[in-house]
Image (cartoon, helix red, strand yellow):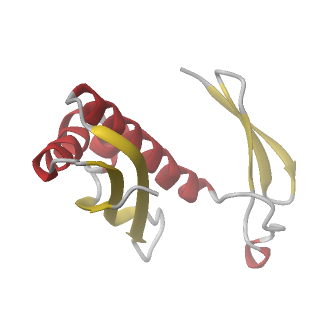
Amino acid sequence: MKAVARWVQDVMFVGESGSGHAIVMDGAPEAGGRNLGARPMEMVLLGLAGCTGFDVVQILRKARQAVGGCVVEVSAERAEKPPKVFTRIHVHYRVSGEDLAEHQVRRAVSLSAEKYCSVSVMLGRSAEITHDFEIVPPP
């Protein structure tokens, strides 16, 4: 797996994944940026949300649950001094579907957090990660 980030100007970079997808990363104006893209640490949280969301949906499907939607909200706290790593992360899942079993959703969240989501496992080595979920009516 590879990635490249190319400096554009000021504090803006364009990142390109090994699979050929590009994304703009930029800083806030007070940091010399123009606010034209996500911050690199926001990208880390987005990676966590996408990774664990993917897992939860796949695990629920394999359990023959009629999952119809999954929204993953991630909030985090960072250390005050550099390198300002994440110290606490909370992941909240809003899962919808027909007749979802609560124990199956709980199982899917746990399996993702503890076994399958490599981003979660990696971040868990430096941050306290908590999870919760709610089952909401289908849209």
Please tell me which residue is depicted at 25% across the width and 26% down the height of the picture.
Answer: 62
Q: Is residue 2 above or below residue 29?
A: above
Q: Residue furthest front?
A: 98
Q: Quadrant of residue 26?
A: bottom right
Give the image quarter of residue 64. Answer: top left
Q: Nearer the viewer, residue 68 or 18?
A: 68
Q: Is residue 23 left or right of residue 61?
A: right
On the image, the x and y values in percent for residue 47 come to 49, 45
* Quarter occupied by residue 129: bottom left
Residue situated furthest right in the rendering: 9
Residue farthest toward the left in the current orientation of the protein: 103
Q: Position of residue 4 (x, y in %)?
A: 70, 31
Front residue (pair 104, 120): 104
- Against 106, is 42 above or below? below
Q: Residue at x 29, y 59 (%)?
A: 127
Residue 90 shown left or right of residue 1 in the figure:
left
Q: x, y (%) of residue 37?
A: 74, 57
Q: As rendered, which of 117 and 78 lies closer to the eye? A: 117
Counting from the top left corner in percent of width and height, residue 30 is at 75, 79
Q: How many marks?
A: 0
Picture residue at 45% right of the left edge, 73% below the top = 81
Q: 104 or 89: nearer the eye?
A: 104
Please say if 74 is above or below 47.
Answer: below
